[in-house]
Image: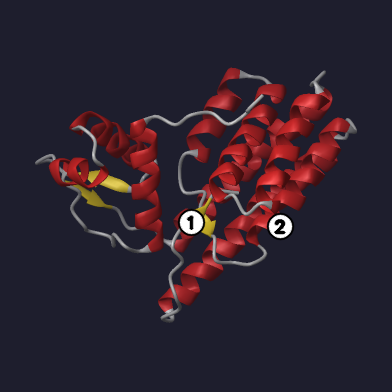
Amino acid sequence: MRLVPMATMGERAADELRTMILRGDLPPGSELKQDRLAEQFGVSRVPVREALAMLERDGLVTVKPNRRVVVSEVTDADLLDHYAVRALIEGEAAARAARSNVDASVLTAAQRQNEEARLSDDLTSFLSSSTVLHRSIWDAGGGFWLKAMATQLWSGRDYTPADLPQQLARASSEHELIVEAICDRSPERARQAMTDHIMKTAGELLAYRARLADGGPRPHVLTRP
């Protein structure tokens, strides 16, 4: 049974635009026009509006009084704050999951699919299976507000360069440590493993941005941990 969820057209457009913004292809102040984006993505204006609403919620674009949509400035401090809050929320989710009666087979299956995608260099499946794994942990942790906050933070600025050779291997091994701690019913170990995972991703993204500022090469894609 395949665990990977299908994204909507709006979500796919939002992912494309989010990548372009964080990669620097769309610098702060760039105007995003719905008609042009709809033509670029081969969709109607409806999913484009949905995508822009997602990006506004994430703080990546700003809607001006005249309804012009422009790319917001994202500082290193903004990114670090985002990841730190996400680590708090998802660390708590992992700790709660370790205290719950979670079905270990669900988490281990998601982690196994994630590792298989890494071994086959299937980036799309790796990203999707990572999403499934994290959401499975939120579900196991329970609580409406925890899951709502984790979902909003996950849909935001959680992207790091895919051209880092160790990126996918690191993320996959850290996923394994998180799942192992949850299945061992070790709340604090699960919390720490999740926190370390998210904050290492933050460190990689900040280092990447520093290299770009020094004229370093840009990757073709950014990846979610």
Find residue 99 and report its horizontal and vertical position in percent.
83, 25
User: What element does badge 2 sit on?
Assistant: helix
Identify the residue at the far left of this view: 66
Instruction: Return the residue nearer the eye: 178 or 74.
Output: 178
Q: Residue at x 27, y 60 (%)?
A: 28
Disc nearer the start of the sequence (2/1):
2
| Residue highlighted by disc 2 | 170
Q: Residue at x 62, y 38 (%)?
A: 129
Q: Between marks 2 and 1, how big is the CA–CA gap?
A: 15 Å
At label 1, counting other C-alpha atoms closer than 10 Å, the crowd grade (few under 14, some 14-19, many 20 or more) is: many
**Up-down relation of residue 113 to residue 32 (above or below):** above
Asked whether residue 192 appears in the rendered view, the answer is no
Say which quadrant the N terminus sits in. Answer: top right
Which kind of residue does numbered mark 2 sit on? Arg
Q: Is residue 64 left or right of residue 168?
A: left
Instruction: Answer with the quarter of the image where residue 200 lies.
Output: bottom right
Instruction: Answer with the quarter of the image where residue 177 lies.
Output: top right
Instruction: Answer with the quarter of the image where residue 178 lies.
Output: top right
**Up-down relation of residue 33 to residue 5 (above or below):** below
Residue 222 — which label?
A: 1
Asked whether residue 211 appears in the rendered view, the answer is yes
Q: Residue at x 56, y 39 (%)?
A: 128
